[in-house]
Image (cartoon, grey):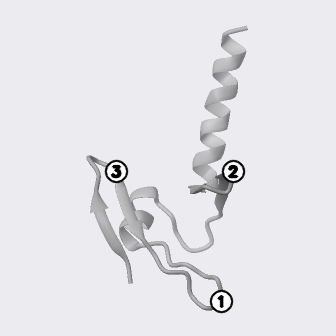
Amino acid sequence: MTKKADIGGGIVQVATVGTKGQIVIPHKVREQFGIEPGDQVLFFSKDDSFLSIVKMDNMQQMLDQMQEFLTQTK
C-alpha cells in the first residue's frame, strides 16, 4: 500500500517495509526516475534522521558534473 502527495512538481509517496525488510518503489517514482529491474540505487542518510534513495546512474552523473565544475573553477 502506498500513499502519495503532490508537492509542487515533486513526488512524495509512502511505502511500507515488508517482513523481509523489502520495500517496493512505487510505479510513478520508478517511471519518473527511469528505475528498471536490475538498476542499482544508493541509500544515504544524515544523522539517522534523513534517508534518501538515488539511482546510481543519476548520482554518478551528478558527481561527474561537480568534478567538471570544480576543475573549471581552479
Q: Secondary structure at mark 3?
A: loop
**Residue 55, how many percent across, how many down?**
58, 56
Residue farthest along the bottom direction in this orientation: 19
Q: CA distance from mark 2 to mark 3?
A: 24 Å
Q: Which residue is mark 3?
A: 10
**For the residues carrying marks 2 and 1, which lies nearer the camera in this image?**
2
Amino acid at dot 1: Lys
Q: Earlier in the sequence, mark 2 or mark 1?
A: 1
Image point (26%, 47%), residue name: 8
Say which label, 1 or 3, has the lower sequence index.
3
Which residue is disc 2 drawn over? 47
At horizontal 67% and vertical 54% (from top left) the residue drawn is 44
Q: Which residue is disc 1 drawn over?
A: 20
Residue 20, compared with residue 52, is above or below; it is: below
- In the picture, which quadrant includes the C terminus? top right
x 66%, y 53%: residue: 45
Quadrant in which residue 56 is drawn: bottom right
